[in-house]
Amino acid sequence: MPTAADIILLPDVQTLIHRALAEDIRTGDATSQALVPEDHRTRAVLLAKSRCVVAGITVAQAVFRALA
């Protein structure tokens, strides 16, 4: 059975990621453009008050790799 890491490498999945990014990159995100300086960089911490399942990490990593 393929893992999430295997699936994320499939050409169709990579194409979907690039198309989704192109949609916002082409015209930009109006809210982000209005509120966040272009050169702003940040970090985040996810804090859960109890045990939880975090889904989508592999996809998030692939998106950030595509932006790099």
Image: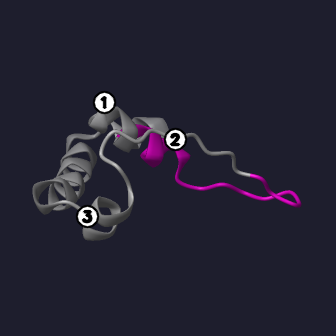
Mark 1 and mark 3: Cα distance apart in space: 18 Å
Q: Amino acid at mark 3?
A: Asp
Q: Which residue is mark 1?
A: 68
Tell me if I can see residue 1 in this picture.
no
Instruction: Answer few, some or many: residues within 10 Å of disc 2's Cα (few below 14, many 20 plus, some between 14 and 19).
Output: few
Quadrant housing residue 66: top left
Where is residue 33? Give x, y as percent.
Answer: 28, 60
> Which label belongs to residue 42?
2
Task: Point out the tag, 1 or 3, that comes first from the N-terminus.
Answer: 3
Helix, strand or loop at label 3? It is loop
Q: Position of residue 53 (x, y in %)?
A: 72, 57
The mark that comes first in sequence, 3 or 2, is: 3
| Overall secondary structure of the magenta section | loop
Q: Nearer the viewer, mark 1 or mark 2?
A: 2
**Farthest bottom residue in view:** 31
The structure residue drawn at horizontal position 89% and vertical position 60%, both measured from the top left corner, is 50
